[in-house]
Amino acid sequence: MATVTRKTIRSVALPAEHGGWSFWLEPVLLAMLVAPSGTGLALVILSLASFLMRQPLKIAWIDLNKRKLYARTRVGVGAVAFYGFIAFLAFLASLAGGRLTVIAPLIPAYIVAILQVWLFDIRGNSRHWSPEVLGASVMSAFAVSIGLAGGWALEQALMLSLIIIARAIPTIFYVRARLRQIKSGDTDASVSLILHGIAIVGSIVFAVVGGYVPGLTVIALIMLMVRAIYFIQRGTVIPAKILGIQEVVFGLMLVVFTAIGYIIGF
């Protein structure tokens, strides 16, 4: 039987993609900055355990379905059990500290997450843009629940999710365009730029009509579109890892701008 090494544990139990970590961090960080609470902290732990469970679950399921038992299979099963236990405790803490309505937004999110794992991850299609968009949308639901736990009204909490989606979906297509450009020189980023434009227009509408979105969020989204245009036109070849780190920084920029905007009322 193969020996379980630290490298195996790390590769199975921890996602390597910077984008995946951003999908988890940005919604929970934004929500906790503007609507902090003890129940919200429990929801952060629940979101982290759920996020971390995806990769080992996929690996363990694929191996066991093939009736294979490798070192990574054992690590995957153990990681799923550990993360599942943490998620269960965090879920109980969320229920104890909040109302059932706080958990309600997570029900459709988990249904979508299960479908995502079944339809894409287990079948080896996780590199398609669809599971990336679904994953970002699923994680944004935690921003809604944390906002509700912090005393926000439903329509306000939903805005947190929409802001995260307005950042995530155009970025997914921008990163895919940049990777194509780096590999083949293809400079077509039209889909990404159109989605950036839709996000900006939508944020302006929500900012002006209902005051639901801070002005600083609109500025941050405009900056994201400018960075997309600049880097696509410049066409600098950089490692995918550096591109991922850049996007983590830009994501944190939007979170900070939005949180400050909510706090100061602009």
Image (cartoon, rainbow, N blue to C red):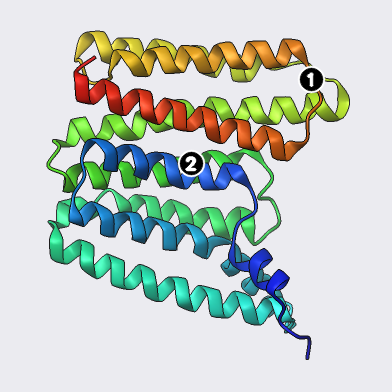
Q: Amino acid at mark 1?
A: Thr
Q: Is residue 126 left or right of residue 46?
A: right
Q: Is residue 229 left or right of residue 236?
A: left
Query: Mark 1 or 2 closer to N-term?
Result: 2
Which x, y percent locates residue 241?
71, 40
Q: Quadrant of the N terminus?
A: bottom right
Q: Which residue is mark 1?
A: 236
Q: Which residue is mark 2?
A: 136
Q: Amino acid at mark 2?
A: Ala
Q: CA distance from mark 1 to mark 2?
A: 27 Å
Estimate how packed mark 1 is, as few (under 14), some (14 to 19) or many (20 or more) residues with alpha carbons within 10 Å: few
**Residue depicted at 12% across the width and 56% down the height:** 99
Dot 2: element: helix
Instruction: Establish if 13 lies above or below 195.
Output: below
- Examine the rendering and report whether any part of residue 166 can be seen: yes
**Residue depicted at 16% across the width and 44% down the height:** 150
Front tag of 1 and 2:
1
- Examine the rendering and report whether any part of residue 199 can be seen: no
Which x, y percent locates residue 25?
44, 45
**Residue depicted at 68% across the width and 70% down the height:** 62
Closer to the camera, 251 or 53?
251
The answer to which image quadrant residue 128 occupies is top right
Dot 1: element: loop
Which numbered disc covers residue 257? none
Instruction: Establish if 169 lies above or below 8.
Output: above
